[in-house]
Image: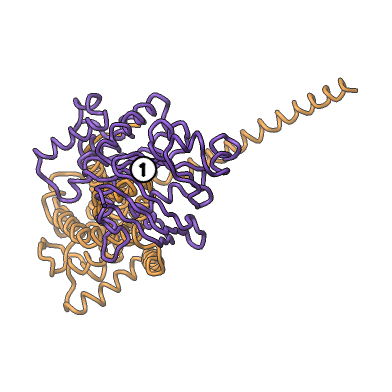
Chain colours: A purple, B orange
Amino acid sequence: MEAQGQIQIQDLNAWFGTTQALYNINLEILPKHTTAIIGPSGCGKSTFVRCINRMHETLPNTRVSGKVQIAELDVYGKGVSPVWVRRRVGMVFQKANPFPTMSIYDNVAAGLKLNGYSNRHELDKIVERSLRQAALWEEVKDYLKKKSGASLSGGQQQRLCIARALAVEPDVLLMDEPASALDPISTAKIEDLIFDLKQQYTVVIVTHNMQQAARVAEYTAFFLMGNLVEFDKTEKMFTKPSDKRTEDYITGRFG
Amino acid sequence: MVRREGLLSRAAGHNIQLHRRISNYVALGLITTAALIVTAPLFLILGTVIYNGVGGLSLDFFTHSPKPPGEPGGGMANAIVGSLMILGIASLIGLPLGVGSGVYLAEYGRDKYGNIVRFTADVLNGVPSIVMGIAAYALVVLIQGHFSMLAGSIALGIMMIPIIARTTEEVLLLVPHTIREAALGLGIPQWRTVVSVVLPSAMSGVVTGIMLAFARIAGETAPLLFTALGNQFWNLDVNRPTAAMPLQIYVYALSAYDDWHQLAWTGALVLIGIIVITTVFFRFATSRGVKEAG
């Protein structure tokens, strides 16, 4: 059965030049759940999520092999454009990156507008809906078109980026350490948000912070040196991990 | 023992402090002098041009074409219009090609072909302007069979390309990679990302490059000598020889008549004025839009 937003990964390998970053990853991510990717720095967790929406290949000298399937879409299939894939898979990056020359409204509408969508009435509705979903509407509704996206605070900018990703109605939302540059209050807001988002979206979140993984994700995958060590329900991972290395990591013995 | 060491080092420290203070003042004095020497010529030139040129400013200067020497009231109206037309046509050539190749170099040109283009642009930038004039003479004037405004515009337009291309490339590379990633991550195609996201973020830098190129060619005389040639009369036809301010200034400055010398000074002042006004206008016109805050 292929449900909307289900991600299947088979034998995924990824390289930077001659350095291999991921080794034979096999993983199935359930739709409308949140899956956390944890592991020490440099273990390949960012590379892993960037392979799901084909962002890995935008860096020079990179290569990917293996299969990624999102519902019926074969991400690396012949004739599949990375542009189509990215319209269905939203991404939120570590550092909030609103478009500096655009207003708040245009930032949220960018994914639609720049792809040729121009129904003003619909755009207004989508912008409002996306900002509400990202819990930012109340804070910015009075100056949507007056203020630049870059004029917001760090936490607001990150929620703006989430709204921007949601506006194109993706099936999957990838988040690459979305709260690592934010203070605890902003982090809590983002985490609440992730909790709500999984009602509608498949969320994959990369995090350094194991408490965060425990708070937001039903499933957790532990990566180490480019290998997937363990993948299980978060509760089980954090109480009875089956692999010694997972236990060492989550108890803080290394990493 | 300990105390003596302390005293000694304190005494030495005092000397070192004095020594440092002196060398600080010397160094500061040297770099301040260097800075003054750099700015002095600019103010000397501006001062001289204004001092000698202001006297000749009159309505006639902007509304009349040249008159024979000795006859009062001649102006440079035809040269002003000629220069503006030449600069306009040159910009039509240099601006799209310069910005286009700059975008190519920054966004796609990370390969061997890009390096060839980059190297060619740098060489082109270093070609003496008189050579550019000769090239336009051979390629346009000889083929057309006569001197023309078009030939001058082409020579100047080609001179604009490498300046605009290299500054455009440099400022586009300053746009953070994260901004590009954000756009690509939304499923926006790369060309659209460049046009609608990256280029607007770097707009003020791109405009600076365009203005640099514009100011550079606005005063060029050598490339116009064998192309636009110059003209004592009105001409609005791109296919005919045309007056241009640098040419007119050159001819008048070398003449034997005092009132023509006066016109040359005033012409120089007006030419500088046109460059300053155009630069300020474009900077103002392109700096509007959403205000950016920290």
- Of residues B214 and A68, the one drawn nearer to the viewer in this rendering: A68
Residue A236, above or below B216: above
Q: Is residue A68 left or right of residue A227?
A: left
Q: Which residue occupies 52% across, 38% down?
A: B32
Q: Position of residue B281 (x, y in %)?
A: 22, 43
The answer to whether residue B258 is visible is no
Under circle 1, the secondary element is: strand
Which residue occupies 43% across, 47% down?
A: A46
Disc 1 crowd, CA 10 A, few/some/many (<14, 14-19, 20+): many
Q: Is residue A217 above or below residue A143?
A: below
Q: Does A213 appear above or below A111?
A: above
Q: Is residue B16 left or right of residue A95?
A: right
Where is residue B40? Give x, y as percent.
44, 43
Vertical position of residue B178 compared to residue A103: above or below: below
Identity of the amino acid at label 1? Val
Which residue occupies the extreme right position in the image? B1
**Front residue (pair B237, B283):** B283
Q: Nearer the viewer, residue B162 or A85?
A: A85
Horizontal side of residue A57 vs A121, given as left or right: right
Name the image quarter holding residue B161: bottom left
* Quarter of the rendering containing residue B97: bottom left
Residue behind mark 1 = A204
Q: How many marks?
A: 1
Where residue B18 appears, as percent x and y from the top left, is 70, 29
Q: Residue at x 24, y 48 (%)?
A: A4
Q: Quadrant of the C terminus of chain A?
A: top right
Protein chain holding label 1: A
Q: Which percent across, then down, holds residue A249?
A: 55, 39
Instruction: Mark yes or no: residue A128 visible.
Output: yes
Query: Which residue is most to the top?
Result: B3
